[in-house]
Amino acid sequence: MFKNETICAVATGMARSAIGIIRVSGPDAISICNDIFIGKKRISEMDSFTAAFGRIVEAEEGAENETETGIKNGTLRTIDEAVVLVMKAPHTYTTEDTVEIDVHGGPYVIKRVLELLVKRGARLAEPGEFTKRAFLGGRIDMTEAEAVMDVISAETDRSLKTSVNQLTGKLKEEIVALREKILYQTAYIESALDDPEHYSLDGFSETLRPEVQEVMDRIDRMISTSDEGRIIREGIRTVIVGKPNVGKSSMLNSLLGEERAIVTEIEGTTRDTLEEYVDIGGVLLRLIDTAGIRETEDVVEKIGVDKAKESIEDADLVLMLLDATENISPEDEEIMNSLSGKNVIVINNKIDKISEIREDASKEFEDRIEQKFKDVGVKSSKTMYISAKTGEGIEELKALIRDMFLSSEIDYNDQIYITRSRHKASLADARQSLSTVIDGIDAGMGEDFLTIDLMAAYESLGEIIGEVLEDDLADKIFAEFCMGK
């Protein structure tokens, strides 16, 4: 259907700005835009990848709705001055005729131009439809299409570079190379079965084994990057927890470098989760400030406490705040008991209120925490001393978080990072099929049976680049895109 319809959308948003860009793509893009634009050259006369200055016009009410007639009769009304850029198929983003209209960035002006385009036969594009047409037209594969949205959504230099790496086809190249190796082996087996006089399968299983193992190893390397890749793309889900009035909101404000959360001496000030993002050395920290965890009869506060406990379940990192001026309380113990399987940084806050931190006391305290977390089953833990109020220790905390989650600097030219769960799942499916091939070789199964699992692996890898992809999944992926892209 996308071959028959012409779509339009705002590419720059419906907010006041200096310039507003409207994109039109489809078989009638040039003729539709030609009907609403007057310049030294008509759009229909322009060469591909050329621009022209002129006016966006419409027929006055009651006049004939034809631009050429309106020019002669003087019955056209100017909507705005504009610059248009003409790009002709197939060398465009969507592989279709495309026109970009640059007008002044007023929401009403943009709305009027869109109305003219729809009146002339275009329809408003769905979210991601321009990129979907690029995919359906064969210009990009699914990994590159997803990378487009990742580039738009990038919050740090690291996530941007990783997204651009995928956008330039690094992941696609690796997947295509793996599929070619699998297809070659499958094709040889099929040829030998069809033409045994010219192709022999004697001892082929032992030849096949190292080839399959190599593909599995390369898949394993990609899967091993998925946790770090997700963090690069989505950020580290970091939950700040502690009993009431321990300094959680002050901690959030210190990490953000601004007064985002309300801070008072009154216990229970924070009633709900508060989520913010902060860039720490190229790593995106997704901070979630939670309500103080304690037993309470207050209905609203209890909802906040329940949300805090739910946030812990999904966290990559838990920042557990303690009051350095007090002993560990039963409420602190209860929170610690809920941290099984988590990466935890225990933060002793309010050191500005302590005259001196004794080394022997710190060592005894840290040993106690370490033993507690060992009993609970915490994945990893560190202990720090800070003052959220004065900022002392905040930079050291940021460095610790970064070192905990990113093992080394990324080689952006060569390293492929798996940033989406969809890719990881397909890689895991492909690996499982190849593992079955190895088991089949060990069991002495015939080569014709091995081709079943080889092709299953081939198809699983094809899901990543969109060679094998169900329509509903494709629709779901592109629905995540913003309008005009």
Image (tube, rainbow, N blue to C red):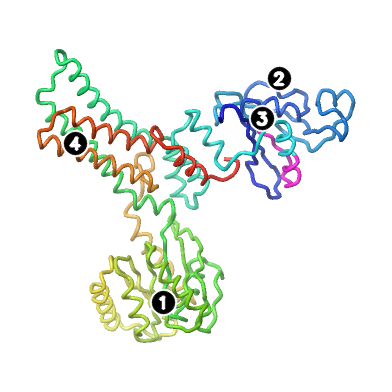
The first of marks 2 and 4 along the sequence is 2
Disc 4 marks a residue whose amino acid type is Val
Q: Position of residue 98 (x, y in %)?
A: 62, 29
The local secondary structure at tag 4 comes to: helix
Q: Is residue 463 left or right of residue 113?
A: left
Q: Position of residue 248 (x, y in %)?
A: 46, 74
**Mark 3 near mark 1, Cβ–Cβ under 8 Å?**
no
- Identify the residue under disc 1: 242
Q: Position of residue 363 (x, y in %)?
A: 26, 79
Q: Is residue 420 left or right of residue 201?
A: right
Quote the CA–CA distance across marks 4 and 1: 51 Å
The first of marks 3 and 1 along the sequence is 3
Examine the structure image and report whether residue 105 is included in the region drawn in magenta.
yes
Q: Residue at x 44, y 44 (%)?
A: 161
Quote the CA–CA distance across marks 3 and 2: 12 Å
Disc 1 marks a residue whose amino acid type is Gly
- Identify the residue under disc 4: 437
Quote the CA–CA distance across marks 2 and 4: 60 Å
The span shown in magenta is 100-112
Other residues around mark 4 within 10 Å, as few (<14) / some (14–19) / many (≥20): many
- Identify the residue under disc 3: 85
Disc 3 marks a residue whose amino acid type is Leu
The local secondary structure at tag 2 comes to: helix
Q: Quadrant of the N terminus?
A: top right
Other residues around mark 1 within 10 Å, as few (<14) / some (14–19) / many (≥20): many
Examine the structure image and report whether residue 132 is included in the region drawn in magenta.
no
Q: Residue at x 70, y 28 (%)?
A: 32
Q: Is residue 110 left or right of residue 302?
A: right
- Residues 282 and 212: in front is 212
- Identify the residue under disc 2: 45
